Amino acid sequence: MTQDQRATARGMISKGDPSRSPAQQRDDFDAVFGALPLGDDVTLEPRSLGGVPALDVKVAGAEGDGVILYLHGGGYVIGSARTGANLAAPLARRTGLQAVSLDYRLAPEAAFPAAVDDALAAYKELLEGGREIFVAGDSAGGGLALALVLAARREGLPLPPAVVVFSPWADLTLSGASMDTRGDFDPLFSRAHMEAYVDHYLAGHDPKDELASPLLADLTGLPPLLIQVGTAEVLLDDSLRLAAHAAEYEVDVSLDVVAGAPHVYQYNVGLMDEADAALTRAAAWLTQRGFGGAVA
């Protein structure tokens, strides 16, 4: 990325005060990411999916039989289906698949396992439609995507054919070395931020629960997994260790690391070359497996 692009990306984000209330943090996040332009070819339509509010992210020409279930990031405390649409839309555009972004319940009002329950309910309804479903998510939504697959496996449900996660938060025990060694490089988070999110979401529940920390789970039988991460983030080791752990369980895993890129740098699509390239690679990874076909 150019220096100007790096400055633009960093200018969109900054380390907030982790002591601010969830409501204040949501307002801050929505002010930056809640109304980013999606493109003239995108229409958002509210719907219910398994009793959970969601948005159909309709991209002109993306009419493939498969569907992307997108799970937004935000530490299980902030974010929304609308912020998730910022990444669901370019994925749909590049794959030709339809997409839906889920408004799962947030903590602390709805603590663990509410988000997992909502994602599973939505997934079950999509399964009833008979279409191929693949799951994608960023940050906490990336961890939730993995938790959803584990929950589906536990219930004996068909698993998605592929999973894509951007900078996944997969270890709520916060044991990765980068939680401390990358704190000065990460323009968005520090250990204090992640500890606050853990407190809100788990509300005292064991962080070693596999549905809270999929990194610690038995990953036997998981579908092909694509992980994308930047090096300028405290969650770097979640991705590195997740890839190694998945490989130990014979999961088909691909790891994509971009030097100097911040947390979920894909949000900077149209502003940062690496963001556009990463989303294009993610779409190609899916289409190589027989899902979708780019429309633009």
Image (spheres, helix red, strand yellow):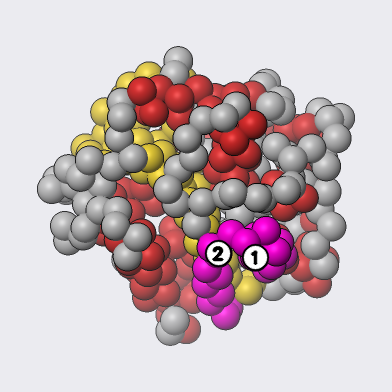
Circle 2 sits on which residue?
Answer: 253
Placement of 125 over or under 280, stated as above or below: above
Identified by mark 1, the residue type is: Ala
Q: CA distance from mark 2 to mark 1?
A: 6 Å
> Which is more toward the observer, 158 or 93?
158
Per the rendering, the mark at residue 146 is none
Badge 2 element: strand
> Residue placed at 65% from the left, 65% from the top?
247
Identified by mark 2, the residue type is: Val
> Residue placed at 53% from the left, 63% from the top?
252
Circle 1 sits on which residue?
Answer: 247
Residue placed furthest toward the bottom: 2
Q: Position of residue 61 (x, y in %)?
A: 13, 48
Q: Is residue 236 left or right of residue 273?
A: right
Q: Is residue 255 magenta?
A: yes
Residue placed furthest toward the left: 61
Q: Residues within 10 Å of mark 1 (few under 14, many from 20)?
A: some
**Figure quadrant of residue 242:** bottom right
Placement of 292 over or under 3, stated as above or below: above
**Extent of the magenta region:** 239-261
